[in-house]
Image: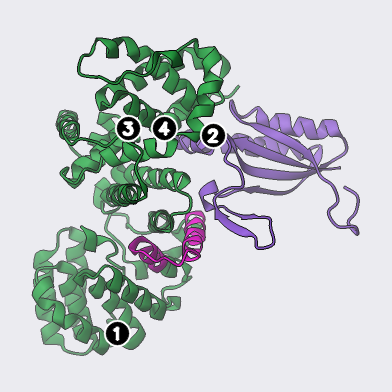
Chain colours: A green, B purple
Amino acid sequence: MSELDWIGAALASARPQVMGALLRYFRDLDHAEEAFQEASLRALKTWPAKGPPRDPAAWLIFVGRNAALDRVRRDRRLQELPPEDQLSDIEDAEADMAERLDNSHYRDDVLRLMFVCCQPELPATQQIALALRIVSGLTVKEIARAFLVGDAAMEQRITRAKRRIANAGIEYAVPDAVERAERLGAVAAMIYLVFNEGYSASGGEAHIRRPLCEEAIRLGRLLLGLFPSEPEIMGLLALLLIQDSRAAARLDGHGNVILLDDQDRNLWDRNKIAEGLVLVAKAIRHRNAGPYQLQAAIAAAHARAARPENTDWEQIDSLYQMLEKLDPSPVVTLNRAVAVSKARGPDAALAMIEPLAPKLQGYFHYLGVTGALLTQLGRAEEARIAFDRAIALARTPAEAAHIRMHLDRLAAQSSACDASARRSEPVVGKHKA
Amino acid sequence: MRYALLCYNSEAMVSHLPKADEEAMMARVRAAETKISERARIGPSLRLMPTTAATTVKAGDDPLVIDGPYAETKEQLLGFWIIECESHEDAIEAGRLLAREREVGGIEVRPLLAYNAGDETP
């Protein structure tokens, strides 16, 4: 018998479904959590002897519901009690329960559980913290660590978020197709937030926050497993996988971000890329492009290039063009300009982004790209002005160092064509922030 | 005789194993493979991508292409080994060596037939 933590894995993997079902029964997050907690404790007592049951989720839902029932009866606030006739001895009922669980509310339960975490009135950080606590089951301590705050502060944040949810009036009826689509969209956005919270980290924090990326991918897989034919969810998961495939290559020894062109592509995770590419291919079959699919396709185009010079910039340009139409934003146009500069030269790119100046004056990447394009065109003085303004807006030492490198090159009066537009890592997703 | 050793387990559960546990499990699988290779020849052995990467084509005049695995099951086929060995007992023993390394799920030992008429009898 192995000493691997199968029971922990069984509890963690069953959690979203169990919590989703318990939330539907109790219509209260705290009650659902308590019931899950009690069921888990009983599982830890009984499972080690014979291993997890065949259907851990059904077992936990049944036991959790049963164990919490007495308390719930005493609680006047809750009107809707689970029907008595469904309760009997666990052993007898388990198979029957499992049967019913499979076919009934499973999908919408988990979707609802995820959806309650992304109420629009909750700020992004609270949505993320709540999802990690409620859906993923991370401890407050683990979440606090990932957010680099104290345990007490995180506890407070989560409690506050739960209180807001309790007053938000969650819909418990089975959602219709339109509601379901809305929920899916909100949940997808929340999952992407979780990912970016981990992915945008650099320096010493990066490895501490990496679990957020892994958790987001897990949530993406969970969601796609529930809704296997949603192309945007395929796109979302593909995007996360392909971005995450670069984790080992995107920071140097000091934790500074390495741009896409300069990364050691041998360090990219080939399995994650392969899975991402399959999901992009699956999504394309649906012929219903969406922002996640397009961003994933752009990430895929980079992933396919064994060397930076093999990158299909024409394709990336046209994908950004589609993204511009679907989800117009100056940041998308800025990203497209980088592709255009590679495919058609700096003139075309500069013409494209000059009109964005009023909107993006105070945006670091805008000034960085502008400076790089001006450098390529031999307009050194204007380039220096753009870089000077960019460096003042840098938020991380890595960003500042990158601009300083450009300035040093200008100062050295190296030939203009040598300094190509280095900034080629797409600022994917940031336009949503 | 040729056999497929099919590894079934809950995909979600396996994905929740701590990284250190997963690495420990893979190391033990490698050790089991070494042991198996004493009595059998190991052919292709592959891990499958998660079921979310799967597409199913349903039979029919105009086959329907559906996203997801063929069947929704509690445990999923996660990977397989093809082995060639002398006896049925050897194949079962190979399955035992692999199954010992896990508490949940199981290994299905499935004898193979020749697929094409010209093929050598398995």
Rounded to the nearest angstrom, the CA distance separating label 2 from label 4 is 28 Å
Q: Earlier in the sequence, mark 1 or mark 4?
A: 4
| Marks 1,2: beta carbons within 8 A | no
Q: Residue B49: give x, y in percent of width and height.
A: 56, 50
Which label was assigned to residue A297? Answer: none
- Which residue has dot 3 on it? A138
Q: Residue at x 24, y 36 (%)?
A: A170
Q: Residues within 10 Å of mark 1 (few under 14, many from 20)?
A: few
Q: Residues within 10 Å of mark 2 (few under 14, many from 20)?
A: some
Rounded to the nearest angstrom, the CA distance separating label 2 from label 3 is 23 Å
Choose mark 2 or mark 3, whichever is in front: 3
Amino acid type for the residue under numbered disc 3: Leu
Q: Name the secondary structure under disc 3.
A: loop
| Marks 3,1: beta carbons within 8 A | no
Amino acid type for the residue under numbered disc 1: Asp
Q: Residue A64: give x, y in percent of width and height.
A: 39, 18
- Which residue has dot 4 on it? A17
Chain ID at mark 4: A
- Please, is residue A245 above or below residue B38 in the view? below
Q: Main secondary structure of the magenta part?
A: helix
Residue A279 visible at all: yes
Which label was assigned to residue B24? Answer: 2
Choose mark 3 or mark 1, whichever is in front: 3
Choose mark 1 or mark 4, whichever is in front: 4
Rounded to the nearest angstrom, the CA distance separating label 1 from label 2 is 49 Å
